[in-house]
Image (cartoon, helix red, strand yellow):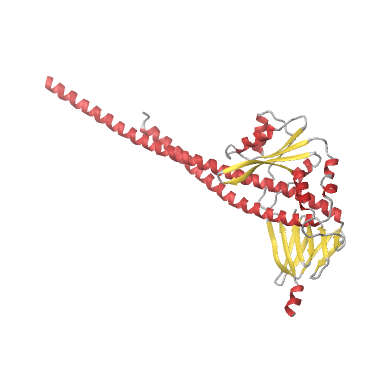
Amino acid sequence: MADTEQKTKILHVQARAPFEVYYQGDAYSITGANKVGKFDILPGHSDFFTIINPDSEVVIQTDTEDITIQVANGIITVKDDEVLLFLNI
Amino acid sequence: MRRANEIKKDTEEIETVEDLTSVFESLASTQVAKIKNKVQMSQDFFNLLWGKYISLRVDSDSQITRRQKEDNGRDVYVMISAEAGLSGDIDLRLIETVLRGYDPKTTDIIVLGTHGAQQLKQRGIHYVGYYKVPMTDTYVDVSPIVEAIRHYRHVKIYFEEYVSLGAQDIKTIDLIQQIQTMTKDAEGSSEVISDQETIFEPSLDEIADIMEDAMMSLAFSQAILESGLAQDASRFSAMSVAKKRAMELVSLYKLEYHRSKRADNDRRMREVMISIKRKERARANA
């Protein structure tokens, strides 16, 4: 039971550009910015589809480090804690 | 028969050519391995993005075909050639394929790659746009080309396709039609993402527009990568053939060199023998 709860608190993330995989694995949160403003994606987030602001940064918080990625543009999708970041498209 | 010294000099020159072709062959082989990896990564990325796009409940006719209502009534052929030569006859085959269906009254040509542009100029074929092949190790920026083709009715991309190291073909895709067909084929399948249960920021339509542009760019990038792969493979084949020919020539020249040397020795020996006989005859007569 405790294991199941732990699993639901993790995001499964793929952050990639056409020729590069920036990060693939679990994360606690993702921070970025879109037209509406700055946003955080945490485990349990509603299904979400957004365009990242051009020339902004995205931060992926994992259990060992915060990964900061500078992006020219991109799209983020969230569905059932599966997060896909399509960057520099 | 040529003199041994001349043959030796020619042999050394051919050996230099052999060394050079060997270096070019290795470079092409390394480049093929590198680009193959990029093609695979780009394909995976495209598939992931495509999976999300077809899940969006946006009518494909209202999106991609909308471009056709704003077109300029002309078609465009985009020809992706090499930046440099030394890639065998593949660019010539590409140009011949492009020109087979080309009608200047209805169609414009946009060319990528210096080699292709030079070849078209030599044949007196007019092109409306020329771009250098936009490739770096990490990013293929095709936005100027996508912008240039935006107002055409049909966009056909002609490029060189990698089949294997020894075989390359010319491939043609109708860009907009292909995306429309793929979208229609995918309708009714896979997961559904609608605004009932998903938050779209800024809006579903804006996101779909951006994804379409991204996929057009990606399709283009993939054609450019595929073309680069085919050109490197063709360069590898051309260099292998040149190296083999150089090795054969070196063997022939070495054989000729030894024959020439032996002939020189035989001639000297004959001259010595004749000289001895003359002296003997002169001595006997005296």
**Most extreme residue toward the bottom, as rendered?**
A2
Q: Say which residue appears at 62% left-offset and 40% top-offset.
A: B84
Name the spot of residue A10 as percent of width and height, x first: 75, 71
The quarter holding residue B161 reads: top right
Q: Say which residue appears at 52% left-offset and 46% top-offset.
A: B23
Count of marks overlaid on the render: 0
Image: A54 above or below B122: below
Quadrant (top left, top right, bottom left, bottom right) of the C terminus of chain B: top left
Q: Nearer the viewer, residue B108 or B172?
A: B172
The quarter holding residue B166 reads: top right
Name the spot of residue B12 as percent of width and height, x first: 43, 39
Q: Nearer the viewer, residue B124 or A49?
A: A49
Quadrant (top left, top right, bottom left, bottom right) of the N terminus of chain B: top left
Q: Left of B67 or right of it: where is A66?
A: left
Q: Nearer the viewer, residue A7 or B148?
A: A7
Name the spot of residue B185 as percent of width and height, x first: 76, 50
Q: Nearer the viewer, residue B254 or B90?
A: B90
Q: Say which residue appears at 77% left-offset and 69% top-offset.
A: A29
Image: A84 above or below B130: below
**Most extreme residue toward the top, as rendered?**
B285
Image: A43 above or below A35: below
Name the spot of residue B119 as percent of width and height, x first: 65, 33
